[in-house]
Amino acid sequence: MFIGKAAQLSGCTVKSIRHYEAIGLLPAAQRQGNYRIYTEQSVELLIFIKCAQQLGFRLKEMQAMFDRHPGEVLTLELARAAIADKKRELMNSIDSLQRLHGELEAFEASLAHAEDQCRLGSR
């Protein structure tokens, strides 16, 4: 199928597909003259890339995942490993944000206490 059809089926733009090829995320399509020809497997990979992006994966992360397993077709094991890594990253971020939130709460409380002390001292 041509690039327009692959874009339509995957929900990606033609520009994105060309970019994914340029950065090595999507294997280069075979050519028929000047036209790129995509397979169903290419469309499935495009759908995976689009979904992964919507779930917070950056293109660099996906490139690193594919670079660790060069030439290997995207497998369920690869996807699961990447998801597990992303979940760990998110949990670390959540922990850091909760800690920061607690520190802000404590700082706010100390400001309120200091303000109360200033009021009491001025009477």
Image (cartoon, rainbow, N blue to C red):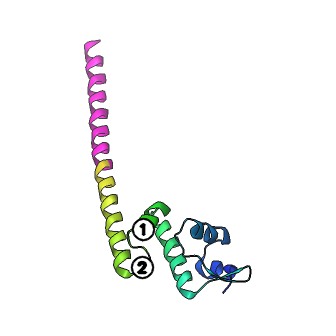
Q: Amino acid at mark 1?
A: Asp
Q: Which mark is residue 72?
A: 2
Residue drawn 52% across and 70% down? 25
Q: Residue 67 at x, y = what percent?
A: 42, 68
Residue drawn 61% across and 72% down? 17
- In the picture, which quadrant includes the C terminus? top left
Magenta-drawn stretch, dominant element (helix, strand or loop): helix
Q: Which residues are magenta?
A: 97-123
Helix, strand or loop under label 1:
helix
Q: Where 123 sits versus 18, above or below?
A: above
Indicate whether residue 116 is drawn in magenta: yes
Q: Are marks 2 and 1 in contact (CB under 8 Å)?
A: no
Q: Which mark is residue 47?
A: none
Neighbours of disc 1 within 10 Å: few (<14), some (14-19), many (20+): few
| Number of numbered discs visible in the structure rendering | 2
**Disc 1: which residue:** 67
Q: Amino acid at mark 2?
A: Glu
Q: Is residue 8 left or right of residue 64?
A: right
